[in-house]
Image (cartoon, grey):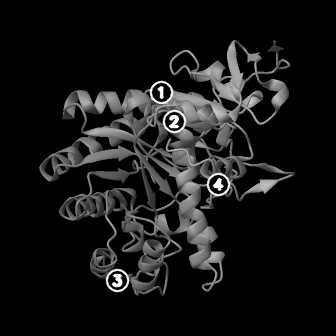
């Protein structure tokens, strides 16, 4: 799973060096080739055209950043006044030209996927699928020649300044549309991109949306949003009354359910743009850790499966949630606990032993900490001088959760 950062709000289109180097210094290895930063189909009155992508591409290479995925430019749904400056046919033609250039340029610089929105400005609802079917099949010829996959992002609809569901903001509709395109263009030419701004709002069940897409899902644009307006915020920062507006639990559970191993694209442009420049490097370090955390949560089962043998440390509820979710597929040898009263008992049939028993393990047996005091226990294991790999298990986002009281037996 690759954690990619979108440059909007972080990297200046005119002077990209500092922003790209800040991303590299924060630990990012991959950045989104975002053509929204380089050109627009319609310019506001009096605005100067943005420079091309040459400086961005050159400085990304100098900073050692890879460009695994690109995002084509488009005109957001809430820019209706700008859209009205062109006839719908001319606007669609201009967008197609720009997307063609984006696909060709992205391929030359190593991108394997290009995120492309459907046409929606001036497109009648009853003509949406016909017009976009023809549009994407024309782009398929370009993508085939370039050797890239097109990832379709949900369409945008804006009513009185609020986003509402479009034709592809339903997982089943998106899956059917991608399958129909692949039947004509060839399997694998098209996939789907989950945009948290579009699919995450309007009361969507994110778990159902993600599982409907399944293996078609190739990229996820991660951002915190309330689903009412366009916002690109660092995950876990849009909170009220101690909780997030975004249903991250459903997102993580859905991605786990399909064994997702694609691209995670952090879109935090508004958070970055609002952050004072001198604080921005620190914020980007937090963003990288947030992306890594989400990748770890989503790939929890992959982390467990890395090891042929494992034991647990902790005999509480987290241990029970491990057994409930993964105990059958990845059974631990035993668990241990610092509480002497637990030694010699069993928790849901799993023996509880003293931490000293860990010294008898073969070096290739992993120790999974199942306790919120991760760093304290990890330090304890380090002081014991054990050669075993140490990993964390976490039950914040389990597929199933233990609700009844812990049953401990002598």
Residue 169 vertical position relative to residue 18 in the rendered view, above or below: above
Give the number of marks. Answer: 4
Gap in angstroms between the C-alphas marked 4 and 2: 34 Å
Residue indicated by mark 1: 309
The numbered mark, 1 or 4, whose residue comes first in the sequence reads 4
Gap in angstroms between the C-alphas marked 3 and 4: 29 Å
Which quadrant does the C terminus fall into? top right
Residue 110 vertical position relative to residue 404 in the rendered view, above or below: below
Q: Residue at x 61, y 65 (%)?
A: 286
Q: Nearer the viewer, residue 65 or 167?
A: 65
Residue 391 position, x and y percent, is: 56, 42
Residue 407 position, x and y percent, is: 82, 15
Residue indicated by mark 4: 224
The numbered mark, 2 or 1, whose residue comes first in the sequence reads 1
Tell me if label 3 and label 2 are in contact, CB under 8 Å. Answer: no
Q: Which mark is residue 51?
A: 3
Disc nearest the viewer among 1 and 4: 1
The numbered mark, 1 or 3, whose residue comes first in the sequence reads 3
The numbered mark, 3 or 4, whose residue comes first in the sequence reads 3
Gap in angstroms between the C-alphas marked 2 and 1: 6 Å
Q: Which mark is residue 366?
A: 2
For label 3, the SS is: loop
For label 4, the SS is: loop
């Amino acid at each position: 799973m690759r954690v990619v950062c979108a440059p909007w709000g972080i990297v200046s289109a005119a002077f990209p060096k500092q922003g790209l180097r800040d991303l590299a210094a924060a630990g990012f290895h991959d950045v989104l080739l975002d053509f929204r930063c380089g050109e627009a189909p319609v310019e506001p009155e009096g605005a100067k055209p943005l420079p091309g992508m040459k400086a961005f591409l050159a400085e990304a290479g100098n900073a050692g950043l890879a460009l695994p995925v690109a995002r084509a430019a488009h005109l957001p749904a809430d820019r209706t006044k700008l859209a009205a400056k062109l006839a719908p046919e001319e606007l669609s033609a201009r967008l197609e030209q720009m997307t063609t250039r984006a696909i060709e340029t992205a391929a030359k610089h190593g991108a394997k996927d290009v995120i492309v929105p459907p046409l929606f400005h001036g497109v009648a609802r009853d003509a949406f699928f016909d017009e976009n079917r023809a549009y994407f099949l024309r782009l398929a010829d370009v993508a085939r020649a370039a050797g890239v996959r097109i990832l379709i992002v949900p369409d945008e609809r804006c009513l009185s300044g609020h986003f509402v569901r479009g034709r592809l903001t339903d997982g089943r509709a998106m899956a059917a549309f991608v399958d129909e395109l692949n039947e004509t263009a060839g399997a694998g030419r098209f996939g789907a991109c989950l945009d948290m701004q579009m699919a995450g709002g309007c009361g969507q069940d994110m778990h159902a949306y993600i599982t409907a897409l399944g293996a078609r899902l190739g990229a996820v644009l991660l951002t915190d949003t309330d689903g009412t307006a366009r916002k690109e915020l660092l995950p876990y920062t849009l909170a009220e009354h101690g909780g997030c507006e975004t249903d991250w639990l459903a997102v993580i559970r859905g991605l786990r359910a399909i064994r997702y191993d694609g691209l995670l694209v952090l879109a935090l442009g508004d958070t970055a743009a609002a952050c004072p420049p001198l604080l921005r490097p620190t914020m980007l370090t937090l963003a990288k850790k947030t992306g890594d955390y989400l990748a770890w949560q989503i790939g929890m089962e992959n982390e467990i499966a890395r090891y042929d043998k494992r034991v647990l440390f902790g005999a509480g509820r987290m241990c029970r949630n491990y057994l409930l979710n993964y105990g059958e597929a990845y059974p631990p040898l035993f668990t241990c606990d610092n509480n002497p009263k637990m030694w010699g008992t069993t928790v849901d049939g799993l023996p509880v032993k003293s931490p000293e028993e860990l010294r008898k393990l073969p070096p290739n047996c992993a120790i999974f900490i199942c306790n919120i005091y991760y760093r304290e226990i990890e330090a304890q294991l380090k002081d014991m001088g054990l050669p075993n790999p140490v990993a964390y298990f976490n039950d914040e986002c389990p597929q199933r959760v233990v609700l009844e009281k812990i049953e401990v037996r002598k």
